[in-house]
Amino acid sequence: MRIYIFLCLICWARFGYLDFSSKINGVSKNPENNRTCLEFSKLNAMNSLKDLFYPKVKIELLMYSRNNVNCAEPLFESNNSLNTHFNSSKKTVWIIHGYRPLGSTPVWLRKFTTTFLKEEDVNLIVVDWNQGASTFIYSRAVRNTRRVAESLRGTIEHLLIHGASLDNFHFIGMSLGAHISGFVGKIFHGQLGRITGLDPAGPKFSGKPSNSRLDYTDAKFVDVIHSDSRGLGIQEPSGHIDFYPNGGKKQPGCPTSLFSGMNYFKCDHQRAVYLFLAAFETNCNFVSFPCRSYNDYKNGLCMDCGELYKDSCPRLGNQAKLWKEELKKKTDEWPLRTIAFLDTSGQNPFCTYYFALSIVTLSETMRNGTISFSLLNDLGVLEYPRLYEKSQSFAYLQEVKILAQFVNDIVNISHICMTYFPSTNPYCSTCKYRIQSLMLKSLTHPERPPICKYNFVLKERVQIEFQPDACNTQMG
Ligand SMILES: *[C@@H]1O[C@H](CO)[C@@H](O)[C@H](O)[C@H]1NC(C)=O
Ligand SMILES: *[C@@H]1O[C@H](CO)[C@@H](O)[C@H](O)[C@H]1NC(C)=O
Ligand SMILES: *[C@@H]1O[C@H](CO)[C@@H](O)[C@H](O)[C@H]1NC(C)=O
Ligand SMILES: *[C@@H]1O[C@H](CO)[C@@H](O)[C@H](O)[C@H]1NC(C)=O
């Protein structure tokens, strides 16, 4: 449904009701060798209109490396020799964009290439299929995805002859680009090193068999981020691991009304790209929690990631590859896909910091209820978490675990403030409940030692404040 409104809006825009200003760049040159830099194809709504009558697919490959971060060069020279900046022994990252109904350059593209090259020394190739993605007819762009993949076959074979290896290829596809990556993977029988799908397109792909869309069999490792699975993105899991930030449907900070213009349609969908970039740029760990459902995750049922992940839960972003072996084992042996949940904040860099609070009571009369708490850091700033309101059942010697997220990290915790609220009336102002132990652990930074408090008393609706201690070793 949203896709159709989206298209209407585009037509509307075409006639000047909305302003889609596009940047106008002059021709730039690489000062090092005075070569003219290649540019992403500049198209506009006129081209999309023209495509109605004269459909056309054209692919340009823009090659970047640390030697030409700001100036794309052709991958192959006009005499067919490989660009000298391409180093076959390095990893090669392919970036493939999605549907471009108005032909504009993806706003995130520039940032993506520079961020990637800053963090990793790779050959980076932008697959510009703008001519083919710019059409008012979405299903035509969908049909073109296979043709784009097919036309990359020759280029890739050529690179292999020059000593590159499929294993060293990492395809990163946004929306339709994710499925193009999948089709390339199918052509090479799943031998690509990695495919990252950034909110793979949903319309025309949802519910299709695995040979008609991105699938985990397309590469040795496939990781997918779903950020708009009810709109432009696909709902069903398709990788070795599928991340569903904020449940995967709606993203915090995105407009909720149509009056915000185009951003209403694109914001959730594009968030996958920005999360991937934020995970790269910041030292925030986007830890995720493999879980059956978002609800189970919110109810704190998936806080420890189980035996499978020794040190930490899998992290969204480029780092996801660190969990490749464990995840592959799971898909190969059982076969079980991993779907993982996490929450983010609504603003760049989208970080949240997870803590797990666990409590064991010695009381036999403590009633079901909730625990709220806040943390005081060593600078005297009190940080309040986001807690999922859920009544816990406190029973003698039974551990209760609570998942908490903070907008800011708290490294040195000087005090914990805590209140217990029973969920049923009447409340008892004289009741006391003895707590055997409390443990607070950072899940975002599992390498930090947890902190504990032993043997204290909670009263109903009375805030207590205490300094935590180091944990006894058998607990921590
Ligand atoms: C092909 O062209 C490139 C750049 O124009 C040049 O550096 C290279 O030497 C040429 N190779 C051959 C085999 O002519
Ligand atoms: C290509 O990359 C490898 C590995 O990073 C490096 O050892 C080698 O020096 C590079 N070759 C050139 C010509 O830069
Ligand atoms: C407390 O919670 C548990 C599990 O949620 C539930 O089975 C039990 O009935 C609750 N007890 C009361 C007194 O509400
Ligand atoms: C935490 O405390 C340690 C030791 O007192 C100190 O070196 C460190 O800078 C503190 N970290 C932060 C983020 O406050």
Image (cartoon, grey):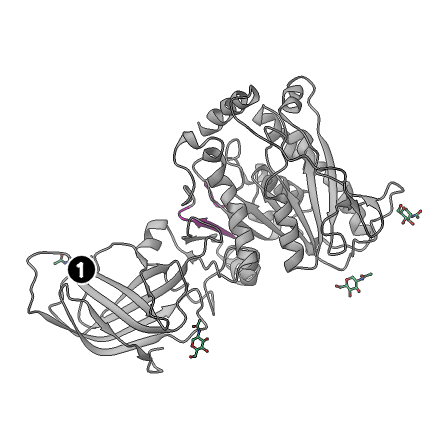
Q: Quadrant of the C terminus?
A: bottom left
Quarter that holds the N terminus: top left
Q: Is residue 356 left or right of residue 185?
A: left
Q: Position of residue 48 (x, y in %)?
A: 63, 24
Give the main secondary structure, helix, strand or loop, of the magenta stretch: loop
Observer-nearest of 441 and 151: 441
Task: Pinpoint residue 467: horizontal percent, then vertical percent.
Answer: 28, 77
Amino acid on which disc 1 is placed: Gly
The residue lying at 82 percent from left, 51 percent from top is 161
Q: Is residue 118 visible?
A: yes
**How many dots with numbers?**
1
407 lies left or right of 455: right
Which residue occupies the extreme bottom position in the image? 473
| Label 1: how many Cα within 10 Å (few below 14, some 14–19, many 20+) | some
Residue holding disc 1:
369
Q: Is residue 322 above or below residue 338?
A: below
- Is residue 449 inside the magenta stretch? no
Regarding ligand 2, which quadrant of the image does it lie in? bottom right
Does 243 appear in magenta? yes
Q: Which residues are magenta?
A: 234-247
How far across and how far down the image is residue 413, in percent? 35, 72
Q: In the depicted view, which residue is nearer to us: 342 or 8? A: 8
Q: Position of residue 264 (x, y in %)?
A: 45, 34
Q: In the structure shown, which secondary structural element does the residue marked by tag 1 occupy?
A: strand
Q: Looking at this view, is 317 or 413 the one in front? A: 413
